[in-house]
Amino acid sequence: MMINKRLIGTVGESKKYIAGNVLLQWCALAANIAMMFAIARLLARLFEQTATAAVCAETAVLALLALGIRFCCTAGASRMGYFSSKAVKRTLRERIYQKLLRLGASYSEQVRTSEVVQVAVEGVEQLETYFGAYLPQFFYAMLAPVTLFAVLCFVNVPAAAVLLVCVPLIPAAIAAVQTWAKKLLAKYWGQYTALGDTFLENLQGLTALKIYQADEFKNREMNEEAEKFRIITMKVLTMQLNSITIMDLVAYGGAALGIIMAVTQFAGGHTTLTGCLLIILLAADFFLPMRQLGSFFHIAMNGMAASDKIFRLLDLPEAAEEKSGEMPRDGEIACSGLRFSYQPDREILHGIELRFPAGNFTALVGESGCGKSTAAAILMGRNKGYTGSVTIGGLELGEIPEDSLMRHITYVSHRSYLFKGTVRDNLRMGNPAASDAELWAVLEQVRLDGFLKAEQGLDTAIMENASNLSGGQRQRLALARALLHDSPVYLFDEATSNIDVESENDIMAQIYELAKTKTVILISHRLANVAGADKIYVLDGGSIAESGSHAELLCSHGLYEKLWTAQQNLEMYGKDGSPA
């Protein structure tokens, strides 16, 4: 009942802690039986007026000893539960993280980031309780009634049999609602994921919502999702309360029946007063372990629902084992008949042909939505559902190991992520072995050294996504990290968007300097930045409209010339009071 062999096998380390937990609980039960026997014997002798000071003292000593053993066993069982929970959190979160690493940069094509966060946090927390509390209680609840039955058989078999027969009524009641509860909790987790997805999206876009005064609309949308979650949560709680009520009726009814049997057997002369009192004192212990298991029912069901989502993530298909090894450092990148669609009925790239010769500076330009960044995502392995051919150094992109691809191409976008930590921490992601002198050298190249020397140098704190730096400073630091990576190919995707003119000029100067020794692919909406490229591809609606050098494209009087003229007029406007 709610035992998932795969789940337990996944966290094999927890088995010894679960076994230790059950053993300690059983020892506490044995101590409790001994204490109850001593108390029953004392009460019987007091009633018969045969109790002596020695018997009272002996009972007190046994009771204290039993209480001490129970305390130690309870503390030990709690400790075992902690170790089991710790193993679960470490193992499952490592498995999830390793899975994401194997899925690579394209993981978001198969699973939403919000769902990953929820199963790795809340989902694993539910399983922490499942392993630390439910599973030990499950096995103990099976063992305790059998132990009590074996003991009470020496006292009175009919009463012991009645108590044992009533115990399975509790799991029967649980099983009766299990199917309904499983469906209900599956809906609960689905709604929980939807709410988390909406919250994460709204949080990430909070600035935009404020700028466009759309926060009220999104607030209403969030409230609707929250209300749906509240309703499903109330249904889950109702189910839990109803199942607990049923279990209480069975447990207390069974204990009452056992007490009646004990009194009846004593009245019939089939057991002694001590035996009768012992059955009465231990009757509840037949049902308490199973009743406690029932109280963990919702935890177990939540754990099962969470494990379904975790295994759905862990079972996502991965790319087949790559056959090739390290790709050549220098080699042409070629795209032939490249097509790509985010949705089946809306193709973004229409069989384009691209060539990026080794050691050349190539640019992709075009209006927004023409497919430039989509092509870049394909080259970086983030978009894998393309058709046609993409080769690097003669090797098909699908045959290249992702780690080899990432060593070969360095990607810098206008949203390059900087991590919370220090400048040194972020730079050494590009080259962990870099010395402080090398770090300062690249910072000098991007003209960020002066600013950092006025701060705390390489130990300058960087907040999450470098929110304490300006846009230009963030991009300079991202470029410095990219220079340290020292790969044969650099791909810049709108790397100078939304930054100040001085930073843009400095970054473009470094890109042109880099193009003297590396293969550089530059995607830019600003044509002035690509004028010095060896070759420029102009994309229009997902197709190649034209290609050539800056001078050749201007002479052809095509789309590039129109875009160039429009941008030049816009940039010159106002310098002398009129359009250029």
Image (cartoon, grey):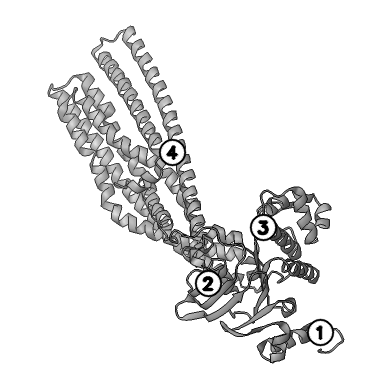
Identified by mark 1, the residue type is Met
Identified by mark 3, the residue type is His
Which residue was labeled with disc 1?
572
- The CA span between labels 4 and 1 is 69 Å
**Is 162 on the left-hand or right-hand side of 410?**
left
Is there a contact, CB below 8 Å, between mark 3 and mark 4? no
- The CA span between labels 2 and 4 is 48 Å
Residue 208, x across and y down, in percent: 64, 70
Q: Residue at x 36, y 41 (%)?
A: 135
Check the image and name the residue furthest to the right.
576
Which residue was labeled with disc 4?
84
Q: Quadrant of the C terminus?
A: bottom right
- The CA span between labels 3 and 1 is 38 Å
Which residue was labeled with disc 2?
390
Q: Is residue 226 visible?
A: no
- The CA span between labels 3 and 2 is 23 Å
Name which of mark 4 and mark 1 comes first in the sequence: 4
| Mark 2 residue element | strand
Q: Nearer the viewer, mark 3 or mark 1?
A: 3
Residue 250, x across and y down, in percent: 26, 42
Which residue was labeled with disc 3?
485
**Is 445 on the left-hand or right-hand side of 319?**
right
